[in-house]
Amino acid sequence: MNQATNAPAETALALWHIDRFVVLTALAGLAVLGGLIWLETAPFMVALFALGALLGVALYHGAFGFTAGWRNLVVHKRGAGMRAQLLLFGVTSIIMVPLLALGKDGMVGALAPVGTSLVVGSFIFGVGMQLGGGCGSGTLFSVGAGNLRMVVTLVFFITGAVLGSIHLPWWLDQPGYDPIPLVRSFGVSGAVLLQLAALGLLTLWVNRVERRAHGQVQREEWLWRNRQHGFFRTLISGRWPFVWAIVILALGNVLTLLISGAPWSIVFAFNVWGAKAAQAIGVNMSQFEFWQWSYPAMALHDSVLANTTSVMNFGLLLGAMLAAGLANRFNAASRQAMGKRPLLAAVIGGLLLGYGARLGFGCNIGALFSGIASASLHAWVWFACAFTGSLIGIRLRPWFRLPN
Amino acid sequence: MAKAYHPLRIILALMVILVLILMDHLHSPTFRFNSGQGNVQTTLSQRDQSACAPCGAPCPSARE
């Protein structure tokens, strides 16, 4: 009787595989790099490193990909991923906009100019998202999870970002306006309400698209539990319901602001890594205007361990690796050999992502997520242009033999 | 399920990244500062409040 009762539980446990090598390697990496950051920088940088790791776990376990979410809406007319993103923006802006309005010394939002550079950059980024197979966060967590095609995308993402940094001053000289914070025109409550209204309208549009295609709306983004597994197993090995990822990503961005003084961003570190690599092979990056500006110049000159964005990215990579190990899916996406055209898509997509992100003042995290959470008009322009670019990228995918 | 990777390659890749990070750090002002050298400007306490974008770009109006 006992044997019969325990059988299903034992079977379930037996099926729960964890990749111990990957998990232990990721934990060792976190310990070594965390220790180094602790020794050489400051405790708040260790906190940011740990936060990056947590965000990596949330992105992987929550399968929180901006790129796939947009594509699912356009191609399959399913809107759960898109609605989850809109929910994330709304929740975070409710917390972050008032926090930024307190005007604490040294705390700045993700504001950026609105102009030619932003429009062109975010549009290019949108095309690159679909060809490269991920956005800023998506590329990073996929690389952490061992996806080889995304490693190619990341390398060219970095290359594109460096090229973008060289050209950005020229683009900034084209027509444009200084940053437009919505709080300045509408006040804190007005800006939050305006953004929530816009996000609500977008949600209604997404629902309409899904309902017209399928007759009903799947409310996956509101599920609190994984239907297949219990709480503990879901927490450790995923897949997390969207809500869990939304809570972690929203709080993670708020904590990043509180600890570092600026919201979460990703791409600036790619610029720094690429510029340092170029310097290592003899290119004098300081000859370019971008790298003469105060903040980039300092970041280029100093250690990557003293750069907030780099430290969080390192954490994110290792966090995603840990999550992939816990899910026993490390490198699972690379089992099939990479064809020439998908490889070409990764190269072109990566270049477009990097160049576009630099011109557009960030990626889906730094410009879109943190931008909306800071109630900056540039984030909304970025959203519209990147989505338009994404439509073109989706149409190009079949030629590159990428599944839609 | 068969492993889709070679463990040694993973260790090697991570070691290469760690060495690159260390090489970069050992040549940085932060390391010199930690080693007791004074009058070194590090990025840890630096923030460009006058910048117009998170990457440190100036405002379009400032370029006219």
Image (cartoon, rainbow, N blue to C red):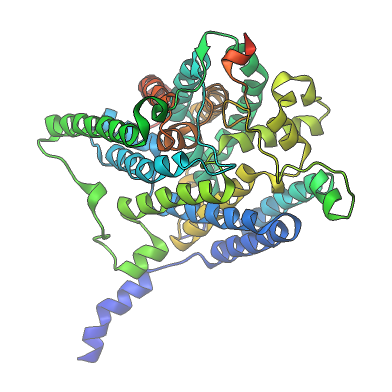
Q: Eyeballing the image, is B49 above or below A125? A: below
Name the side, left or right, on which A42 lies relative to A127.
right
Residue A299: x, y in percent?
71, 37
Q: Eyeballing the image, is A151 above or below A111? A: below
Residue visible at 26% across and 84% down in the picture: A6
On-image quarter of the C terminus of chain A: top left
Residue A352: x, y in percent?
53, 23
Residue visible at 86% across and 49% down in the picture: B32
Residue A265 versus residue A154: which sits nearer the camera? A265
Residue visible at 74% across and 31% down in the picture: A297
Residue A152: x, y in percent?
58, 35
Residue A298 versus residue A14: which sits nearer the camera? A298
Residue A331: x, y in percent?
51, 51
Q: Eyeballing the image, is A324 above or below A202? A: below
Residue A153 versus residue A32: which sits nearer the camera? A32
| Rendering quarter of residue A161 | top right
Name the side, left or right, on which A28 lies relative to B18.
left
Q: Eyeballing the image, is A290 above or below A94? A: above
Residue A336 versus residue A300: which sits nearer the camera? A300
